Image (cartoon, rainbow, N blue to C red):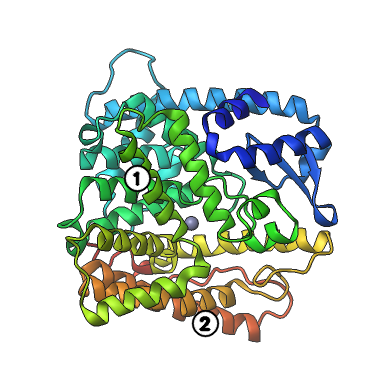
Amino acid sequence: MSCLMVERCGAVTFKRSEQNAIHVRMLADGRLSTGHAGVLLAERRGSYPLIDLHILKTSAQQGEVESGNRRKVKRLLSFQRYCHASRLLRGLVPHTPGSLHLLDDDYLGQAGHMLSKVGTWNFDIFLFDRLTNGNSLVTLMCHLFNVYGLIHHFQLDMVKLHRFLGMVQEDYHSQNPYHNAVHAADVTQAMYCYLKEPKLAEQLSPLDVFLGLMAAAAHDVDHPGVNQPFLIKTRHHLASLYQNTSVLESHHWRSTVGMLRESGLLSHLPADMWQDMEQQLGSLILATDISRQNEFLLTFREHLDNQDLDLQLASHRHFMLQIALKCADVCNPCRVWGLSRQWSERVCEEFYRQGDLERKFDLEISPLCNQQADSVPAIQIGFISYIVQPLFLEWYRFTETSLLSQTMMGHLHKNKARWSRLRYAHTHLDTQTHPHIDEPEPEGGGGEGESIP
Ligand SMILES: [Zn+2]
């Protein structure tokens, strides 16, 4: 462990307490530790809260070396792939015979074409991820940084930028059905759409845009695929480190700061500037804690009622970035049905996996995590009614009923009605198994043909 872990922790001095906790755990248990009720939590690279029961069956040390090498190779390959992709995107296609397979050229060409429509609301992030060979987050971020001229504005080193983005993408857990790098890319794409809203776009500074995109890309990094209550009841060290408050969000932020420092991306900037950037990133990422939803919603509503938002003020712009990121994070039900449904199935699958773990280890099954009792339609209707709809109603007001807001509200209402029909069908017709969501597309093909801003 890890020279990667030593590198990472060595670079992140303020994570000392986290590092110590891991060190003690390693000395005592030889990398594995037994949590409450026998749930095994494996640590990887410093603070990686991986929940992996399979690790018991293999040699931990050998697995580490192999996975370390795999990561290095993957990072190298993705860097080469990006260099090629960026040449393609600029229209500089290399003519060296055999420099890249024809198939790759074709895929990257299609990915490049998709990027030309990255600001449209029906952007298919799943397709984009396949076309970029699992590099959607890195490719998207590099593209958006170019679009906004952020590399030039902040005098960023391209190699450091790519190293940082590669680390972020890699530290998302691809085995999570929902909280993986594709979700991060999806949130980033939504954030870009929101930053383009006329009400916001005219007022945002390059720093606002930089922070908004960075926070979106990193807001769930290293997510373990279980929620905070699970970490608390299994006595995970992150829960005690962050005193059971915004445990995951604090970890996402601190991990991001660690990667920023390890990559040296901002090291050329004055100390007060990069320190301020780190703090603002923290404030944005911490705002995605869903348990703080009401606090933000009430403040947002109050500002709109009083019409006192002054986007000339940095503090008000920051607040709106927090709101935009919160909207982007929960915007799945506002997407066209074909995309929205996939996200719904994925998030419920992640909940059910946690429920299965809890059942297996005689822990109380968390709300929404019981596959036998909590159906996908029921979970989605609750999520839309209590979280998504109230937030997007205020966003709709803020944007002064922009075209994008109208499109999103249209999808939201249709998707909610559709889940209601599916729940009804599930309750009345299907008494045996969990429903598969295969209701035929209504006229209009699920909204793809609608006006897309
Ligand atoms: Zn998220």
SS state under label 2: helix
**Residue type at mark 2?**
Arg
The image quarter in which residue 261 lies: top left
User: Residue at left 50%, top 62%?
Assistant: 289
Crowd band around label 2 with a 10 angstrom C-alpha radius: few (<14), some (14–19), many (20+): some
x 29%, y 65%: residue: 449
- Quadrant that contains the N terminus: top right
The percent coordinates of residue 100 (x first, y second) are: 39, 20
Q: Give the alpha-carbon distance from disc 1 to disc 2, as whole Å.
A: 48 Å
Camera-side residue of 437 and 169: 169
The residue that label 2 is drawn on is 421
Determine whether the residue tagged by mark 1 lies in a helix, strand or loop.
helix
Q: Quadrant of residue 391?
A: bottom left
Mark 1 residue crowding within 10 angstroms, few (<14) / some (14–19) / many (20+): few
Image height check: is 345 above or below 132?
A: below
| Residue at image mark 1 | 276
| Ligand 1 has an atom within 8 Å of the beta carbon of the residue at disc 1 | no
